[in-house]
Amino acid sequence: MLKGGCYCGAVRYETAASPQQRTACHCLTCRGISGAPFVAWFSVPAGSFRFVAGEPARFRSSERATRTFCAACGTPLTFESTGHSDKIDVTVCSLEDPEQAPPVDHTYGRSQLSWVRLGDALPVHPEARPK
């Protein structure tokens, strides 16, 4: 069981699914939303994910995506795409144990900041991961 939530503890979630599509995303939107140079994500089937305490705030970050975050402390939590309603993406570092879902690649490497030096030897995709 993967468990996590926001920094202040107001919002908690859990999923029994194994983390899939683990990546570190360097896109402009993820960077802007998080205030960080990139965001690590994993995906699970939408039906396996549930909020168990509190209710996150939601906003549409683009015409095709809705993101959730804690309204009290601002922690980014999830990403839901209108084109992939069968899955939900979750921020790795909102897990109680982020070591449970380490990234296996980097996506949107074309947007990577010039001062970020990756030393993990993971593949870097210029845009989304190839299908």
Image (cartoon, helix red, strand yellow):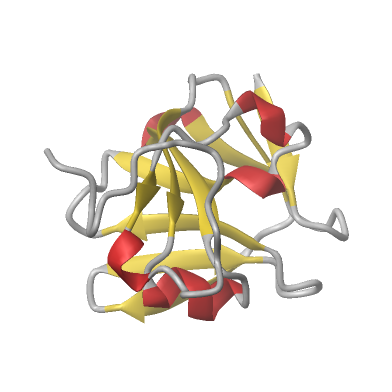
Picture layout, residue 102 above or below residue 8: above
Where residue 29 sits, quadrant-wise, is bottom left
At x 47% / y 75%, what residue is drawn? 114
Left or right side of 64 for 91? right
Q: Is residue 43 left or right of residue 40?
A: left
Left-right relation of 126 to 46 = left
Work out whether 85 lies above or below 102.
below
**Count of numbered circles on the image:** 0
Give the image location of residue 70, x and y in percent: 70, 67
The residue at 64%/25% (across/down) is: 100
- In the depicted view, which residue is nearer to us: 125 or 44? 125
Image spot of residue 15 (x, y percent): 57, 28
Horizontal and vertical percent position of residue 74: 72, 73
Report the quarter where the C terminus lies: top left
| Residue appearing at x 34%, y 60% in the figure | 109
Q: Nearer the viewer, residue 7 or 27?
A: 27
Q: Which residue occupies the extreme right position in the image?
A: 8
